[in-house]
Image: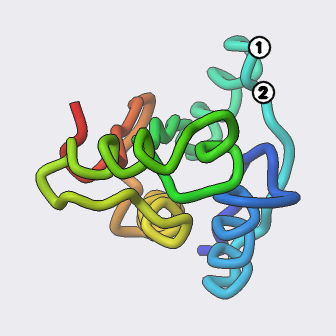
Amino acid sequence: MAKTAIMTGASRGIGREIAKRLAADECSVVVNYSENSAKADELCSRNVTANVIAPGPVAAELFRQGKTQEQIMRLSKLAPMERLGEALDIARVVSFLAEPDGGWVNAQILGANGGYA
């Protein structure tokens, strides 16, 4: 069955990497209903899952803005893996959710953060 991913912000950074990964996985990418729960509920009744990814610190332009190198290094050491996430790390999680193996995951906020708390 073909999968469709609903996302926003695919022009750069994490969103761009996710869109590229989903395209490589032959998924369709469509619109966002982030502020319309009735529309999201309607989608669920059509065998469409609706999940949210909550990434931790990711080595992306938006994360680096306004931070010193020292702050970035300190934050990168807070997760058990002692590194910042990469856009591809987040794209892999989204790809899993869009594939059949992720089909039972629904209505969740998934922390994709390397254990960062």
Q: Nearer the viewer, residue 113 or 6?
A: 113
| Res. 99 in view | no
User: At x 60% / y 32%, what residue is drawn?
Assistant: 45
Q: Is residue 96 visible?
A: yes
Mark 1 highlights which residue?
36
Q: Position of residue 116 (x, y in %)?
A: 24, 40
Does residue 27 sit above or below 51 in this rendering?
below
Separation of disc 1 and disc 2 at Cα? 5 Å
Residue behind mark 2 = 33
User: Which image quadrant is residue 71 in?
Assistant: top left
Mark 2 and mark 1 in contact (Cβ < 8 Å)?
Answer: yes
Q: Which colour style is shown?
A: rainbow
Query: Circle 2: is it few (<14), some (14-19), or many (20+) Cα within 10 Å?
Result: some
Helix, strand or loop for disc 2: loop
Callout 1 crowding tier (Cα within 10 Å): few <14, some 14–19, many ≥20: few
Q: Position of residue 87 (x, y in %)?
A: 55, 65
